[in-house]
Image (cartoon, rainbow, N blue to C red):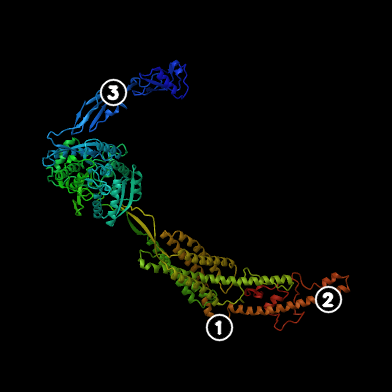
Amino acid sequence: MLPLLLLVLSVAPARGTVHTNLTEGCQIIHPPRDGGIRYRGLTPEEVQSVRFLPFDYEIEYVCRPDREIVGPKVRKCQRDGTWTAMAHPSRCLRTCPRMHLSLENGRVVPRGLERVPVEGTWAEYSCEPGFRLVGSARSNCTKLGRWSHPKPVCELRRSPSGRKAVHVGALFPMSGGWPGGQACLPAVQMALEDVNRRPDILPDYELRLIHHDSKCDPGQATKFLYELLYNDPIKIILMPGCSSVSTLVAEAARMWNLIVLSYGSSSPALSNRQRFPTFFRTHPSATLHNPTRVQLFKKWGWTKIATIQQTTEVFTSTLDDLDQRVKEAGLEITFRQSFFSDPAAPVRNLKRQDARIIVGLFYETEARKVFCEVYKEKLYGKKYVWFLIGWYADNWFRIKDPAINCTEAEMAEAVEGHVTTEIVMLNPENTRSISNMTSQEFIEKLQKRLGKNPEETGGFQEAPLAYDAIWALALALNKTSAELVKKGLRLEDFNYNNKNITDEIYRALNSSAFEGVSGHVVFDASGSRMAWTLIEQLQGGVYKKIGYYDSTKDNLSWYNNDRWIGGSPPADYTKVITTFRFLSQKLFISVSVLASLGIVLAVVCLAFNIYNGHVRYIQNSQPYLNNMTAVGCTLALAAVFPLGLDGYHIGPGMFPFVCQARLWLLGLGFSLAYGSMFTKIWWVHTVFTKKEEKKEKRKVRGDTGGGLRWSLVTRPHPQIPKSQTLEPWKLYATVGLLVGLDVVTLVVWQIVDPLHRTIEEFTKEEPKTDLDVSILPQLEHCSSTKMNTWLGIFYGFKGLLLLLGIFLAYETKSVSTEKINDHRAVGMAIYNVAVLCLITAPVTMILSSQQDAAFAFAALAVVFSSYITLVVLFVPKMRRLITRGEWQSEQQDTMKTGSSTNNNEEEKSRLLEKENRELEKIIAEKEERVSELRQQLQDRQQLRSRRRPSNPSRENGDNNHFPPGSGGAPAAPPGGGGGTGPPFYQPNLPLVRCLVSEQAEKLGRGNCDGSRVHLLYK
């Protein structure tokens, strides 16, 4: 013992330092017999001297070879000074060979087993049906490491009747994804008993079953398949269950010349005869569900289907077949989701993609996971229909599953109303089968054999298929036996190398046709069972039959008892109802009333202007341009009506004409109204600018030349000279040019890229009522292919005109002229129109998706611009004519004198202009004369300076001929002396006297008639 202990301590890794002089902790304990203790951190010498080990210190037991520790393997020092689990001793016991724990064609139940069989372990042995146990039924593992009895064997039991045994190898999934063996195994055993009792079926043979639990796991099935093939006796046929296991077995069986007959495999892949040439199944292919599903889709009017599947071959193949069938039927699988173990993300995707009709393909255990997520995502209720596989247990959603965190009530709520398609596995007609039992008698007999609730038994629905599988096998072997006798062979001659017998069995199975408890049993060319499909619906937690479908005859038998949460089958997608956003009629009527009043006002102003066109005050305001302004305002106001017309009033066919009306009315109205005002203000600015340039030149010449300066009568504002001729045709041509540019632009626009009706779609909205629809708001617009380009050209040109108009109005705000006596009112109107247009244009583009706001901004801008323009231009004229009665006085003057121009200001202005021109000539001559006199004075001054240089002051005084402040110009003699003027020069004229008299400053403004002289010298 000590050498083993020292060996353990010498190889133990040091994990810390343990003090050997401790007086508290746990006392060191001794190792078990044939074993040792591993003390971490202590050397063999320290173990000899230490008495206590510290708290939380751990020790580990080890044993000699061929021995196993029994009891706690590790102990820990506790705070109370004791070791953990001291009530259970740790012992090193001898182990016995593990080979005694397996028995061919039998079962071993070990008792008292630890990790391996040790002293005190015993095993109990039993054999499969058809075998008898040879040897002891119990064997104990002794302290010497040997079993008390040799391993028994299971020998084939000889039939008491002398019949030869024919063995069938089977794999039943008692657990796993589909625990169908729980009911199918008893059903197979019932069938074997019934077949073996029949003297007319295999009279010389007895069918016996050798089976294992595959757990629906291909890995586990591989192990048992190896045992079935390599252990005696020879199996004449293999019967697997579960698609994944059947795929494995069917692929291997052809190498052993074995027929495979499955009772519970639905994978469509197994229908591939090239891959599985010897495979048959009484369970129809999963693709048999698909014709039924397609028929139901058509019945309920669904065209958009979604799917979610577990990632396995059987479900992938089924879904591929369904995809092909729905395409042939003119339907569509819109969404496909798959998962391996966690369905959370695929279920969320289905919710996000608005899936309504969902086909779910997964095993029962995964179905619980899926519907737990379905409950969390609210993917159930009256808007959704789930199609599931019908071979789940009836209470599958009530079974407690630690893999989900949903309650039974939540699961029941989530699965309510789903539809299942299930192969008819039990004959619905009360007719007797080949076993002389009806389907109901079979169910009653099976329930007695099971002894528990069928809903809690896996594979209960498939049990009739397993029962009929044995009968199909027995009938095929019976037929094969008769054929082999003709060839001098027997069934017992079968081996894995005898392909002839395999071919006979294949032909017999392929031609099988009989009435079983599951219905009529017949195989198609691929070896799959052909059957009806049962359609059920979960109503109130209970499955109700709602119909049958016979795919061979395309016949749907319907019970009309389907029930829906919403009262009727839901839609396969959220129906989108398109609704147009129309303009508020109250807003349209209100603005239309304002526009109508504006049109009335424009017509009144136009009539007033035309009626009073002979009045001098109206004539001086360029009435034809004002008429254009009134007409333009009328057109602009008329554009408000088509601007508010939409689908509420007109149809789609009329919409392009309304679009054209909007564009043309607004464009021409703007050009006429604003163009006429712009023309006025542009002419005033042009004339005023020329006057200022001439005045500036004259000022420069007077300063540098020292010429004669005349004192002018000052005015508070600059005025346009009446000598500037105003030609009306130029004004009209300017307006015509602006209108012509608009007309050309609009014509090119409508020819190259005409306006048409476009639809703007908005985000879908949920209705206020509880309807399974969504509302798609739409808004009608007038647009063209290159709308932004045309608007850029149009807005750019108009914007420049507006900005230029503002500039011109500002520059001419102080100018006064009677040729256009309302240009200040025009400038004010331009200010208002420009500001409103420059603000409204970008705002309406931003608010184009809000029909009420966009219309309100645009229409009110047009209305207010028109109102302001009409009021500012015409109301002052009306007021002046009404308050002053000018048209009445002019009419009276006309009656008295016979002429309306004898005593008016225009005639006086004409005379003054003529007189002014004459004075200009006189002044020019006087300036020349002054220049000559100045030259003469300079010559005389030079001459005097040479003669009398001593008296310069006098000479300077003599030369001072001009009074101060006269600018060096000689004063005109009172009598016109100093030179003889031209014959047209008349000093006694009032205007001349005001200009050249020495008493000019003393003359009053009234005497000089300055109020009538606007500009006398340029």
Q: Is residue 505 left or right of residue 818?
A: left
Identify the residue under disc 1: 897
* Rendering quarter of residue 464: top left
| Label 3 element class | loop
Hey, what amino acid is under mark 2? Arg
Q: Earlier in the sequence, mark 2 or mark 3?
A: 3
Q: Residues within 10 Å of mark 3 (few under 14, many from 20)?
A: some
Pinpoint residue 304: horizontal percent, then vertical percent.
Answer: 30, 54
Q: Nearer the viewer, residue 388 or 997?
A: 388
Disc 1 to disc 2, how far (Cα)? 61 Å
**What is the three-letter code of the residue carrying label 1?**
Thr
- Tell whether 24 sits left or right of 427: right
The Cα atoms of the two marked residues, 1 and 3, are separated by: 160 Å
Mark number for residue 759? Answer: none
Q: Nearer the viewer, residue 827 or 731?
A: 731
Identify which residue, 133 or 549, lies in the foreground. 133
Give above or below for 115 relative to 477: above
In primary-sequence order, the first of circles 1 and 2 is: 1
* Residue located beneath label 2 in the image: 940
Q: Mark on residue 146?
A: 3
